[in-house]
Image (cartoon, helix red, strand yellow):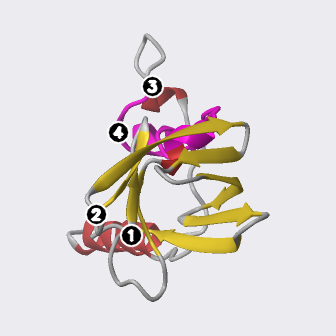
Amino acid sequence: MTLRPLTFMLCLFLAACGSNDSSTVPAPTDSTRTKDGTATGTQLQADTLQAPAKANVQPLPLKQRLLGAWGNETSGKALFVIRPASVYYADHHASYKYSLAGNTITIFYAEFTYKGEVSLVGDTLVIDASQYGRSKYWRFNK
């Protein structure tokens, strides 16, 4: 008589553990939710694994993206720092005012005025100036 309950329990145990198919996820049932409809237990985890909605992110204006230190591939250091109202050259310990109209930068040096078309992709700054050619700089983070 004691063998029957043990056999029954063993069969239940094997039936419960016998399925190794982890690809199926049990469907949510009313028993996994509280009276107010909030999820409980493992159902709560499944509910929170949804991908977040994409935020409507607007790119920063060009002037803000230009701010920072810039160097070229041979300098190994920052050549200049673009600030909100000036461009600072560390080697010369001098700042010069500049303006930005659209994608055209105008830098007012003491002896001349420099004008060029600015393009910025990631951390690469390219300035095309008709008188001076194309210059390429990388954001300097050191």
The answer to whether 123 is drawn above or below residue 60 in the figure is below
Circle 1/circle 2 CB separation < 8 Å: yes
Residue found at the very far front of the displayed protein: 111
Mark closer to the chain start, 4 or 3: 3
Residue found at the very far top of the displayed protein: 36
The answer to whether 90 is drawn above or below residue 83 in the figure is below
The answer to whether 67 is drawn above or below residue 12 in the figure is above
Quarter of image, res 45 = top left
Q: Given this view, does label 4 or label 1 mark the residue nearer the observer?
A: 1
Is any atom of residue 109 visible in this view?
Answer: yes
- Residue type (three-letter) at the residue carrying disc 2: Ala
Mark closer to the chain start, 4 or 2: 4
What residue does disc 3 label? 33
Q: CA distance from mark 4 to mark 3?
A: 9 Å
Q: CA distance from mark 1 to mark 3?
A: 62 Å
SS majority, magenta? loop
Q: Which residue lies at the image location 35% right of the left edge and 48% below the top edge?
A: 95
Q: Which residue lies at the image location 49% right of the left edge and 51% below the top edge?
A: 109
What residue does disc 1 label? 79
Mark closer to the chain start, 3 or 2: 3
Residue 104 coordinates in the image, percent (x, y)? 71, 45
Circle 1/circle 3 CB separation < 8 Å: no
- Residue type (three-letter) at the residue carrying disc 1: Leu
What residue does disc 4 label? 41
- State the SS at label 4: helix
For the N terminus, which image quadrant?
Answer: bottom left
Magenta residues span 39-64
Mark closer to the chain start, 4 or 1: 4
Q: Which residue lies at the image location 54% right of the left edge and 71% below the top edge?
A: 137
